[in-house]
Image: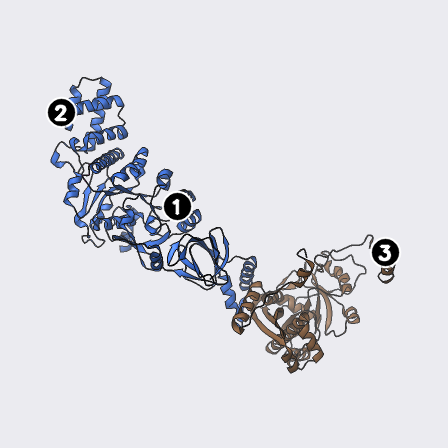
Chain colours: A brown, B blue
Amino acid sequence: MIDFSEITGRFDRAINAVLEPKLDALVGKQVLFSSDEKEYSPMEGWEPKNHFPNINTIKVIDEPTTVAAIDSSSMFIGETAEGMIYSAKCGLALACKGKPVMHFKIGPMLFYINDDIVSSSTIDEKLWKFVLFDTATAKRMIRVRIERIMQNEMCRLLTNAIILVDGSLKRSVFEDEQNTFNSILRNCEANENQLVGISKTTRLKVLDQLAPSLMRNGDTCYIDVSSIVKSLVSNVIGTPLLAKLGNDGLVLRIDVLNDPSESLGRLVANDVIANGYPETLRLAHHVSIFTRTDVTCLKGFILSRFGVKEMMCEDVRRTLLGAFL
Amino acid sequence: MKIVSKEGNELLLLAIIEDKIEKGDYLVIEDSKSKRKLVVQVYDEEYLNIPSLTQDIVKDEVVKASSREGLHDPLNISNLSMLVRDARLFKCKIRAAIDKGKLSSSVSWLPSRVDSKIFKLKMSELDTLLGREGIFPIEIGETSDNDQFSIYAEDLDGNLNVITGKKESGKSHLAKTLIKKLVEHGAFVIIFDLNNEYAGLAWNRDGTPSTINERVIMLEPGYALKFSLDYAAKGAIANMLKHVLDMPAASMREFFRIWDWLNAKNSLGMERFSNAITNWDINELVRDALVSRLHSMQASKLFTDDCKKSCRFEEIIKQNKNGVALVIGMGKTSPVVRKMTVELVLSKLVELLEHGSIPPIFLFAEEAHLYVRDTYWEDIITRMRHFGVYTTFITNQPDAIGDGIYRQVDNIFLFNFTNDFDLERISRVSVVDTDTIKSIVRTLPQRNCLVIGKAVHDLPIVVKTAQAEVLTLGETKRFFKVKIPARQKE
């Protein structure tokens, strides 16, 4: 017979050796529980561990400047035996002098990614193979390419404008030759545009520890976190900041190419800031996301236009693990 | 269109592309695999209502409200999205199946969602399936396909009909159309006209004589409508005294003793009756009772001692063998005289029919609850029907007619009602399900009616009734209508 207590004893010892629980250290700590594995931010910020002295107030620069925000989304629609079908949408919103000017909806567009595309592409073949078999990577590739095109076009079209992009400013392996981040930077410089990347959340937990200092400050303000970010992440472009764009807004990670005071000063003067987030970027996000109706219509379009045959499908996890999953 | 679901005898159909289908329309669901067909009727429609769709609409409107929108949609997916937003669900009731080209009631099978084709059934096709035909058509209007729709005079013959709907919904127009066509087909029609509006039957809207101009006879109580006591006869007078003038039994006995005495002397008349009461040896209280009733009778001017001036229905009918409309105009008569008139006319008609002196007649009674006593209703729909009085009630108060009467109704012409109580009342007693009545009738436009009953072989049909060809009288007099032209001139 198997001695179960001996097995569990050995199991505990082995676990403690490789993954020490250290639950004692939890005593008396502030805790932020997760729901559905989502990451949240504490409403009043973490209790500051160390005071960050260099808080800069954002001074409003009341000069008319166009703010253009770009966002996109992509979605896995279906697959064939040879490839995957994706769709993408892009949103562009413009504001000036604190008022929304216009917004554009682009898409939905459809893409079928199969071996043919891999062979005709200039991207590294291994990376393409990855795109071909991993839907998350493929979606990311589509988004990067679409956003880069839009960012490049805006940088070419506008002068003295602020170009807002969702996320941090960094190069991507998925960029195409015509619309690389470098070309965007060149066009920005040529037309005196200011590129600003705004991230809603950051994976760098250390930055969360700095947020309370900003939150307790009554004004719109920012701190330069270049030294921290660049020590943890390579491939960073411009100056990473933690900024609070509204007096009672949330703290965001913002990457700027130029002088932070000028970029942020013009941004808060020319865009509508609600909860510390630019309204143009919010609008661009909303017009770029897929609705259920979009997905239904896309499927209907594919069925009617391309003469494809819809196959029956099953949820493998549900089938294997049961209905209680 | 596709079948979405079925519950009981109700089917839910999804329509994406704009089909010209309205409430009340009939659809055929043809199962191409089993080669069977179902006939369903649309009784309600609504938007495809899924939470995500509502969210999309709200989000879109908020986004559009925030700034001007530009759109680049290379695949034109937004058009498809609009189609989805406009998708409609038709709620239908299963009415019948089509078996070898004929309607059957075998509806206990389920059509395929995948293999079923759904198409609109034209009213002419439905007529063919129903085998609805007759010799004396009455064109009452149009269906939603703009096809002429007729019922047949035979459908009203021997039947009890109700025309009901709220004020100004088109009841009188339909009644006039029915009467005119019945007379054209040679029928004898008596109309209890409460608003003196049926005299217009003799004239077209443009003022020219109508096709039944010669056959419309106005009988106004006290004027053209008078009876000699002799003609009215004891039975009709007894009914009138008892039910309208509330004469006690003791007084009644004395009244008819005098009646018999005068009759034996062959001198029955109002003047002589008055003298006889004065001289008759009776209790003074009874005398007072008799005198007061006789005064009421005299004041009504419904009675004459001149036999030549007495109205004789059998004579009128004999002189108008090709049909006649006898309009008993009671617009200017008092409520008591109105009731006396109706009591006398109905009693006399029954007597004449009993003796076979006149052929069956069609009776149109507008707002009959105002002049027909409660106990008389049952009499009209049971006894009188057997003698040959085929009644059509026209009312805007469905609760004025008792459940017992509704249950015997053969045809209902149901115009718009928005009041829940009225709809509830009608749907409770109708042969058609509550959902259909409530949903269709509530949204019927003016002059559209839902025909229910034998005339449509128990398949409810929505008809846009034709405007009556005849002159419309009895419209409500308005104060400001007179003033408006004067202002325009200025």
Q: Are marks 2 and 3 on the same chain?
A: no
Could you say whether the residue bearing mark 1 is in a helix, strand or loop? loop
Pair 2/3: label in front: 3
> What residue sits 76% from the left and 57% below the top?
A46
Can you give x and y, in whole percent of width and height, for residue B144 in the image?
A: 36, 58
What's drawn in magenta, residue-wise? B355-359
Closer-to-camera residue (B376/B117): B117
Q: From the viewer's perspective, is residue B168 above or below residue A176?
A: above
Pair 3/1: label in front: 3
- Quarter holding the N terminus of chain A is bottom right
Closer-to-camera residue (A91/A313): A313
Dot 3 alpha-carbon crowd within 10 angstroms: few under 14, some 14 to 19, many 20 or more: few
Closer-to-camera residue (A316/B222): A316
Mark 2 and mark 1: Cα distance apart in space: 54 Å
The amino acid sitting under disc 2 is Ala
Disc 2: which residue: B264
The amino acid sitting under disc 3 is Ile
Q: Is residue A269 left or right of residue B26?
A: right
Could you say whether the residue bearing mark 2 is in a helix, strand or loop? helix
Closer-to-camera residue (B302/B148): B148
Disc 1: which residue: B431
Can you give x and y, in whole percent of width and height, for residue B427 in the image?
A: 41, 45
Q: Which mark is residue A2?
A: 3
For disc 1, the chain is B
The amino acid sitting under disc 1 is Val
